[in-house]
Image: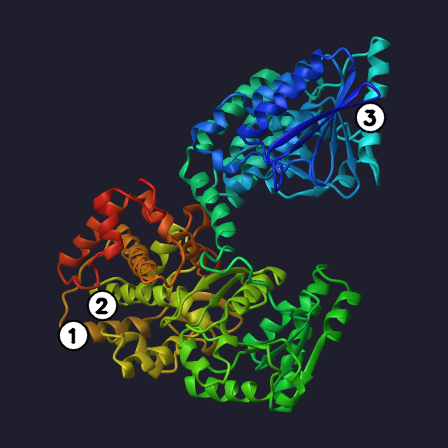
Amino acid sequence: MTKVDYNIRNRTAVIAFEAPPVNSLSYALRMPLLEALERASCDAAVDSVVLIGSNGTFCAGADIREFGGPDVLRGPTLWTINTALDEMKKPVVAAIDGVALGGGLELAMSCHQRVALSSAKIGLPEVKLGLLPGAGGTQRLPRLIGVEGALNVMMSGEPLPVALFKGSPLLQRIVDADLVSAAISVAEEAVAAVKEGKPLLRARDLPVREPDLEALCQFARNTAKTAFKEYPAPLAIIEALQVGATKGFDAGQQEEFAQFKKLVDSPVSAALRHVFFAERAAQRIDDLPADTKPRAVTKVAIIGAGTMGTGIAINFLNAGIEARLLELNQEALDRGVQRIREVYEGQVKKGKLDAAKLQSRMDLLKPVLAYDAIADVDLAIEAVFEDMGVKQKVFAQLDAVLRPGAILATNTSTLDVDQIAAGTKRPADVIGLHFFSPANVMRLLEVVRGAKTAPDVLLTSMTLAKKIKKTAVVSGVCDGFIGNRMINQYFAQAMAMLDEGASPEQIDKAIEKFGFAMGPFRMGDLAGNDIGWHIRKRQYAEGTLKRPQVVADRLCEMGRFGQKTGAGWYDYKKGDRQAYPSAIVAGVIDEVRKAAGRPVRKLTDAEIVDRLVYALVNEGARILDEKIAQRASDIDLVYLMGYGFPIWRGGPMHYAESQKLYEVARRMRQFGVQEGGDADFWKPAALIARLATDNRSFNGGAA
């Protein structure tokens, strides 16, 4: 419930505003907040004002849902409120608890003075949404903490402890307790100063003190062009700051507003805002009963001490959760423990961890050699070879020894979770937890809900994912789930274009220029081409892979598995991960083309990009139609967090919407009818066809 309380304490109006959960400055809050300030301005019983958020938070900023819509400029805007604060004749003190971020910090900087609890954090995170602080932040902050400090705060977008700003004009006082009393005391001191003829302390009146302004701004521009190549917001921040520093506050604020309007309508900001909401939406499970409670998880077991198993274990050790690492071979177990220790020792060398924390985490690791040693854990995760028979054998052992109520999880990346669960006496306790490699680094976790997975098992998995700092996305059961099912179609198109005349390096360069971290062939070499080969052989046997990938199979038969063997789609030199075009691979491709009798043609980079991306989109639409994924934004998260899709494009489904689904469907049909085209592959998914016809988007709105 949004509300603003107005109470008078010793001739100070304490205005406490509330808009759960984080006091966002939506129109619903801005209107009563301005009315309360105007009331205080006219109230003869009031000499000063203290502004404070409710429930332990000052304000986390603007309501991002309003951006791009009419309400962001619906009066009173935050600009109106901040101007009103500038014009107040009575001292106004912001009392900062919890966080003051974005528009919340801009609101606080528009007050005459600021008092903060020592535990509070402040920041301007707009850059993470493709925006700049648009309510005076680029103007007031450099006047309060200096140009270099302001640039660092705005470019990083990170929340920072208030102690970093102690002694600057940004904060008049930092206290450990009794925030309101401290703020009232500062307000009363300001009233006394005004009576003595001293002016109110307005940030806008402070000079910008920077003797090397031009050089500093140019250095920041050069850095931004390199580090934030695809992001316009950092350059806009620098421009607005420099205009204000050289031409005055009002000119700077006009420049800031013009840049904000330009950025808020940009595709980059639209994509980043989409990602912001996607991360929050992914936490919601639409059909989960409201009274579902998670199970307690204090001890976990990981079966398998290989690269994946040790990576998974590190996540739990980092979160302070006991992890038992199970291997049936002492030598393999010792290697796994050493691998974990080496990861932590590397972090100590880089200054990211101290020796005490290394030891505390290693103390939580319990290496074991028998299933009986994990009988009392709350969760067991198998991380063994990707083979149904091997995994079923592990689950039979887990089913026999684990206590009732323990969760049995498989880390499979493609196999049928329901089939694995069917081999146990407790299918309701079985779930898929698909970590991505390296598991201690990659943020994505696919939580695979089986047909019989209990609601509390699903909720526990989502809750635990948050605790170990993973972005979790719920998937239904199918071959490859969300990510790998789609990547199969992506790779299929890469292979098809290889047959038609493109080279591995042309395909990789085209999609990397689009923004992918790696193209399909470099990605295969990094992950290990034998992994895909193993999956393909299963799919050939099942008859689910219609078009053989002859070149890929031939290279694997030659032992060219990628970086780990020094040769894959590319050649590699010892100690050098750079991919070098391979004459051997070119010869194999040419040989396969001639044997197939296919005509060879020149493909443009634009065709390469569209075919790779739209192959993902088409399969993603089928996944949505089949209810494997809850929402299109979940699919986007999978690809942003797990597969290197450029975040500034918002994910494959968002990107397709930005190109208009009618045009996407039309392009797909063109690929199907061109020379050598595969009409069946490029038939638009039923969902795309429906949405394109109705001019709708994946999220249900108008395109």
Residue contact at pointers 3 and 1, CB within 8 angstroms: no
Asked if 239 appears above or below 328 in the picture, the reply is above
Please identify the residue farthest to the front as the structure is shown.
291
Q: Residue at x 59, y 77 (%)?
A: 405
Q: Is residue 547 left or right of residue 129?
A: left
- The secondary structure type at the circle numbered 3 is helix
User: Which quarter of the picture shows residue 487?
Assistant: bottom left
Q: Earlier in the sequence, mark 2 or mark 3?
A: 3
Residue that label 1 marks: 596
In front: label 2 or label 3: 3
Image position of 555 with respect to 284: above or below: below
Disc 3 marks which amino acid?
Answer: Ile
Name the spot of residue 310 as percent of width and height, x first.
60, 75
The type of colouring in the image is rainbow
* Contact flag, marks 2 and 3 (Cβ < 8 Å): no
For label 2, the SS is helix
The span from disc 2 to disc 3 (Cα, nearest Å) is 75 Å
In front: 567, or 66?
Answer: 66
Callout 1 crowding tier (Cα within 10 Å): few <14, some 14–19, many ≥20: few
Q: Is residue 674 visible?
A: no
**Residue 564 percent location from the top left of the image:** 48, 76
Residue tagged 2: 499
On the picture, is 527 further left or further right than 610?
A: right
**Residue that badge 3 annotates:** 184
Q: Which residue is at the front of the view, 295 or 198?
A: 295
Q: Label for residue 296?
A: none
Type of amino acid under label 2: Asp
